[in-house]
Image (spheres, rainbow, N blue to C red):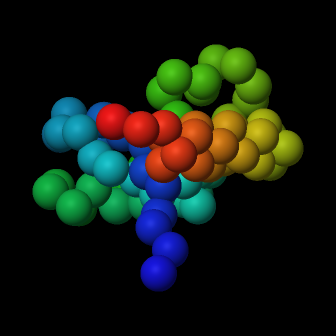
Amino acid sequence: MSRSTYFVQECPTCGRSLHVRVEYLGRRVACQHCRREFVATDPEHSDAAPADSGLALLRRADQLLEMAEQRRHTPR
């Protein structure tokens, strides 16, 4: 069974923190609380590259997946 990797993004409409799957970076998603749609972006790296850069999104997704993998193998 595979586990998904998430990042946290604040809804631009209602301000609630949302856990968004890495696979949805750059795509339109809907807030589960207020139902408003917005583009999923990683706020930690949103100014590092243009939001429409597919290559930048893939790089960030790879970084997040690598971080998740490292956490799985780090003893707690």
Q: Is residue 76 left or right of residue 38?
A: left
Q: Is residue 36 above or below residue 9?
A: below
Image x and y of residue 62, in percent: 71, 46
Q: Is residue 53 left or right of residue 65?
A: right
Q: Is residue 39 above or below residue 46?
A: below
Q: Is residue 25 left or right of residue 63?
A: left
- For the question of whether residue 52 can be seen, the reply is no
- For the question of whether residue 20 can be seen, the reply is yes
Image x and y of residue 58, in percent: 76, 48
**Quadrant location of residue 33?**
bottom left
Image x and y of residue 70, in percent: 57, 40
Rendered-image quadrant of the C terminus: top left
Q: Is residue 14 above or below residue 49?
A: below
Q: Is residue 29 left or right of residue 24?
A: left
Q: Nearer the viewer, residue 33 or 76?
A: 76
Residue depicted at x 47% and y 64%: 4
Image x and y of residue 8, in percent: 36, 39
Residue depicted at x 54% and y 53%: 22
Task: Kindly give the residue lying farthest to the right in the view shown.
Answer: 55
**Quadrant location of residue 50?**
top right
Q: Nearer the viewer, residue 41 or 22?
A: 22
Task: Kindly give the residue lying farthest to the top in the view shown.
Answer: 47
Q: How many marks?
A: 0
